[in-house]
Amino acid sequence: MSMNRRFFLKSGGIALASVGLAGMMPSFLQRAVMAQERSRVLGGRRKTLIAIFQRGAVDGLNMVVPHGEKRYYEYRPNIAIAQPGKGTNGETAIDLDGFFGLHPSLAGFKPLWDQKRLAIIHAAGSPDSTRSHFDAQDYMESGTPGIKSTPDGWLNRLLQTQAVKESSPFRAVALTQNLPRTMQGRAPALALSNLSDFTIRAGQSSQVLQGGFEDIYEQAAGDALRGTGKETFAAIDYLKRVNPSQYKAENGARYPRGEFGQSLLQIAQLIKAGVGLEVAFTESKGWDTHANQGNARGQLAARLTEFGQGIAALYQDLGPQRMDDVVILTMSEFGRTARENGNRGTDHGHANAMFVIGGGVRGGKIYGDWPGLDSNDLYEGRDLALTTDFRDVFGEVAQKHLGSADLRKIFPNHAGAGASKFRGVLG
């Protein structure tokens, strides 16, 4: 086996798209892999982190509305969300604490808030001042704001810090076409574009295996149950056995149609199947609302409807018992301007809002210091100012939920790592 292919497999990589490949596996190997996999990943409860990236910079001020701020309404005469009780029913902010409210399209989040399973961190984000989507996303995924040379992502470093004697090939999975920046690094990770299509890509250098499976079979007896071949065949075999197309959501959950809803459904499927999933990643796109953003209706409302319905369905599908072991963490590269622009949209801003959802979350509360929206409080006179570094939120989840002991290894350039002022969102 060539070095390129060996490294590719050892990195958890598979570049296959075939329903029948697992059926080509020798029967003795199928039985051995199935037994090995069952004993390794089906026993015991496992904590899972689901990271969701809102790519394009969501407008946090309309997502989590500061309806108690007079300036908010002065700055946004056309796109502001009406105060609770002061507009048409169903088109006003959903009040949370008398000052903040949810966009009406996020009505599915209100029960989670009331059950104290949803926490919000406002005025959070990257301390770097860039307004470039590419750079800001890179910094957030690498966990090193302002540094472009970081070779791996923060989620991958999180996995690296946790010694696992025998890990599942499904320990870290992105339900995306390509492996995201945040999951690239030395720790094995997979990118599965669609379980039903059996399409898998992984690793920084995903490529079609050269030489075909004949060469792999030639070495199967030696490799299959002690490393590279074992992970490859186990992954193929699982995808064949799980029959993704027959999956039915539980508890009356209904996922929205489209790639985002489908990715959340498949994450739920992997969690229920007990395949050893610890970190899952997916993304939602289309948040760059420079023109015709809308208010309670329109472009942003449509995106938030899909986003909110998808996450609420995931929570409902998994149910309270499973959600005790799951945390959902949302992020976006930066926020948007406090003032609407001449096209009834918003431009690239600075601080934003993040959601943390799960059974172990101390929810029903807005975390972070609110800086205010007076002109002299705005960042560079135009944006919501930052009061919580996103790494502090990530670090809290990594430490409290997944048990990472040394945050300095996950966020090497963060002076506050391991001694963050941000605490309490998780029990």
Image (tube, rainbow, N blue to C red):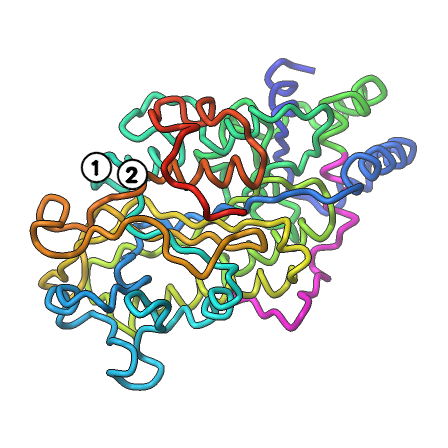
Picture coordinates of residue 148, whole percent (x, y): 31, 25
Residue 418 in magenta?
no
Q: Which mark is on residue 17?
A: none
Question: Dots 1 and 2: beta carbons under 8 Å?
Answer: yes
Residue at x 60%, y 58% (from the top left corner)? 265
Residue at x 73%, y 50% (from the top left corner)? 273
| Residue indicated by mark 2 | 126
Picture coordinates of residue 419, whole percent (x, y): 40, 29
Q: Dot 2, how many residues are within 10 Å of its Cα: few (below 14), some (14-19), or many (20+)?
A: many
| Residue indicated by mark 1 | 130
From this viewpoint, which residue is outermost toward the top? 3
Which element carries disc 1, helix, strand or loop?
Answer: loop
Viewer-proximal residue, 199 or 257? Answer: 257
Q: Is residue 259 above or below residue 232?
A: below
Magenta span? 234-257
Is 289 situated left or right of 249 in this image? left
Q: Quadrant of the N terminus?
A: top right
Which element carries disc 2, helix, strand or loop?
Answer: loop
Q: Is residue 202 above or below residue 104?
A: above
From this viewpoint, which residue is outermost toward the right? 28
Is 291 situated left or right of 13 in this image? left
- Amino acid carrying label 2: it is Ser
Residue 246 in magenta?
yes
Is 388 situated left or right of 276 in this image? left
